[in-house]
Amino acid sequence: MNQVLRAGRIEPSALFAVWSRQWIVFRHFWRTRTFAAIVEPVIMLLAFGFGFGKLVSHVEGIPYIQFVGTGVVATTVLFSATFASMFDALYKRRYQRVYDAMLAAPVDVAEIVTGETLFLGVRAGIYGVAPLVVAFFFGLPPAPAMLLVPVIGALTGIGFAALGMLFATLTDTFDGLSYVVSGVITPLFLVAGTFFPLNRMPEWLRVLAWFNPLYHCVELVRHCAFGLHPGADVVHVAALLLFAVLAWWLAVWRTELRLID
Amino acid sequence: MRGVFKRFGNVVAVNRLDLQVRAGACFGLLGPNGAGKSTAMRILTGQAVADDGQASVLGFELPAESKLARARMGICPQESNLDVDLGVRDVLEVFARLYRVPATDRSAAVDRALALAGLQSRARDHAVNLSGGMQRRLLIARALIHEPELVLLDEPTVGLDPQVRQELWSLIVSLRERGATVLMSTHYIEEAERLTDRVAIMSAGRVVAEGTPGELIRRFAGREVVEVHGTIAEIRDLQARAHADGLATRQSGPALTFLHAEDVDGRVPRGARRAATLEDVFVRLTGDYVE
């Protein structure tokens, strides 16, 4: 036992251990997980972009398929991060009891939550690039600021992964999670500006959007593609940071309640 | 543990438990299901926090220093919580990291654990494809990956066939020989008799008797016992008379066993005479239920 352990701290050595497990599992399942995470949004993009794009050619001066292409980055991140963390966390807590096993080792709940949300968040950020690449083939001009997209995606993904872990503590069955999917995640779409711009929507919807992390992600990705708005973008990043910290804190608190008697 | 108290809702799981395990000992927690053995173990790993009382492990106060204590102990839980998504070797690798085995020793530690569990040939298999006995051995190997000073075994052989139990017993004996302290809970009397050098009998969340198996047998059952068979009515009648006579008895299914038979010769009805066992003690102290 060389490393010095500290109680009540989040230790890098513990995070590496949590990541090593995530990485081994990912190595086994990367084909299916990556396929689902990338193909779905790409199909969504093609359906809306191609199909709907015939009816609407431009939105806010941008070809519709490029508008949707940038918007779908955010939904890819949302789905990949939230679903993976929500189902994994419930499975590992309730059915497989992996968390119980891990907690018998010198690892605390905060370290498990932090390790897993970072892993899933970063992965979601990387998956989020896929729709952008598809959009390139539909004429989206590459821009240097697009290099920031995986970073924005990861930041958003960390928040949503933490939110997923939080949701997983609210129920003991997979059926219970379907309330979350229909009641919370799907409505996020409505006010995010993914498929249609919000500026022609009623005032109250636009106000609501400010409380939707997905909206901030959509805005940032679009600004990376079509031109940054430094003033607004700082606010969007701050909002995503705030969301991530809040979701992480709630996830740690609730998971601790569920795992420590 | 001193005066440790833990309740879940209305159920008191651990009721002012006092327990001390000396370093290097193999200590058995013996008690029926629901006696509070598992809860006591979860308190020791910091996975349950006592409502009252004090607990410390290896000199670390719980729950504040639980993480430091956990680094030096290994736990084999009662119900398997193996990571079924992982291969056998992967399970051990992940836990080597969780237990902070230094990178340079990690591979050797995994090999050692595989050898200990006799699973070298199954290293690449998925954990879920192992037989029940192998899974339990893997659980124990996982708990030993960092060569802990203290090993907690919660019902290590429950639900396993006799042959596998024998194998696990040898494994536990080898642990002791390496100098580790072992705290094991069981409700198999034979297991406690064979493996432990000190036993605490738990009932309803507290220790009702503690000592070496030999001491406990002498104190609570004597040298010999007499088993008298009969109908339910006869047994009930016998028991009432024994009680009035001040004779210690314990129920054993269709029979009544008179304890301390050597001291009360002549007052005990005729029956089968045999040496007293820990089971006599156990049933006397915890009631009728024994698996």
Image (cartoon, rainbow, N blue to C red):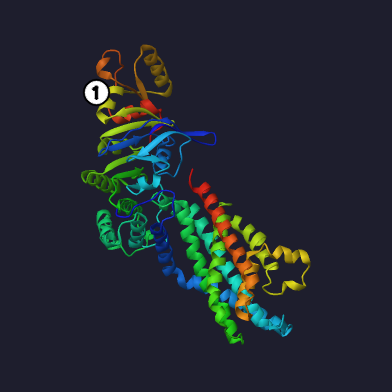
Query: Left or right: B186 with respect to A46?
Result: left
Percent x, y of residue A134:
57, 82
Q: Quadrant of residue A175?
A: bottom right
Name the residue at 60% across, 75% down: A221
Depth order, front residue of A4/A88: A4
Depth order, front residue of B123/A16: A16
Image quarter of residue B180: top left
Q: Position of residue B266 (x, y in %)?
A: 27, 13
**Residue at 34%, 60% in the rendered image:** B93
Please state if B51 lies on the left or on the right of A65 as rendered.
Answer: left
Q: Nearer the viewer, residue A167 or A217?
A: A217
Decide if residue B59 is in sight here: yes
Residue occupied by mark 1: B223
Kindly identify which chain the residue marked by label 1 belongs to.
B
Residue at 27% across, 37% down: B196
Q: Which residue type carries mark 1?
A: Arg
> Which quadrant of the structure image shows residue B56?
top left
Rendered residue at 63%/64% (across/down): A213
- The foreground one among B77 and A257 is A257
Furthest-left residue in view? Answer: B177
